[in-house]
């Protein structure tokens, strides 16, 4: 079962079932099972950390109650890294939901390609930043000021 770890080192399972999908639809107004919109849904989940946090809250609320952890405490333990890991776990959980058949294969392939594209884009952005800042002297404030003009 896919999971992620929060900033306090607690591991949270992200099991996706029909009932959790209904809860996500009711609370987040997103149908993560709508295969016709799956590419947009996956894109939103990779880019919108607030949406990921809301979905994760839907999936983890019962576990929070069982552990005696308030929802506020749970939300306070989510930072960018935890939400990024949760986003990956959500996608894995979604692929697991459709584990058999063409939908599962399609989602697994889409997720793999998305991760490759994200890595390529990150590497390109870092290379662009390095290229922009290399050879320029001065402190970072000067470099930032020069790049904004």
Image (cartoon, rainbow, N blue to C red):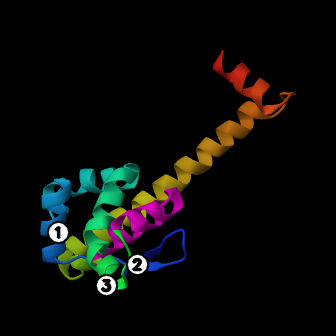
Q: From where the camera sits, is residue 121 visible?
A: yes
Name the foreground residue: 76 vs 46.
76
Q: Secondary structure at mark 2?
A: strand
Q: From where the camera sits, is residue 34 visible?
A: no
The quarter of the picture where residue 83 lies is: bottom left
The quarter of the picture where residue 109 lies is: bottom left
Q: Is residue 50 left or right of residue 130?
A: left
Asked if residue 81 lies in the magenta stretch, the reply is: yes
Which corner quadrant holds the N terminus? Answer: bottom left
Residue designated by label 2: 12
C-alpha distance separating marks 1 and 2: 17 Å
Give the magenta part as a residue range: 71-95
Residue at figure coordinates x 31%, y 50% from the top left: 44
Name the foreground residue: 60 vs 100.
60
Give x and y (percent) for residue 53: 36, 59
Give x and y (percent) for residue 78: 46, 62
Foreground: disc 3 or disc 1: 3
Give the total of numbered labels: 3
């Amino acid at each position: 079962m896919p999971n992620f770890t929060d900033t306090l080192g607690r591991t949270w399972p992200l099991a996706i079932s029909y009932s959790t999908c209904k809860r996500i639809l009711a609370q987040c107004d997103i149908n993560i099972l709508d295969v016709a919109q799956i590419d947009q849904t996956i894109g939103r989940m990779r880019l919108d950390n607030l949406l990921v946090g809301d979905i994760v809250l839907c999936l983890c609320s019962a576990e929070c109650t069982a552990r005696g952890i308030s929802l506020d405490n749970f939300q306070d333990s989510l930072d960018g890294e935890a939400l990024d890991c949760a986003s990956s776990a959500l996608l894995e959980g979604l692929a697991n939901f459709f584990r058999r058949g063409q939908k599962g294969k399609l989602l697994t392939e889409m997720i793999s390609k998305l991760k490759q594209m994200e890595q390529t884009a990150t590497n390109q952005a870092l290379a662009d930043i390095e290229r922009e800042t290399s050879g320029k002297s001065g402190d970072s404030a000067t470099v930032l000021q020069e790049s904004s003009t």
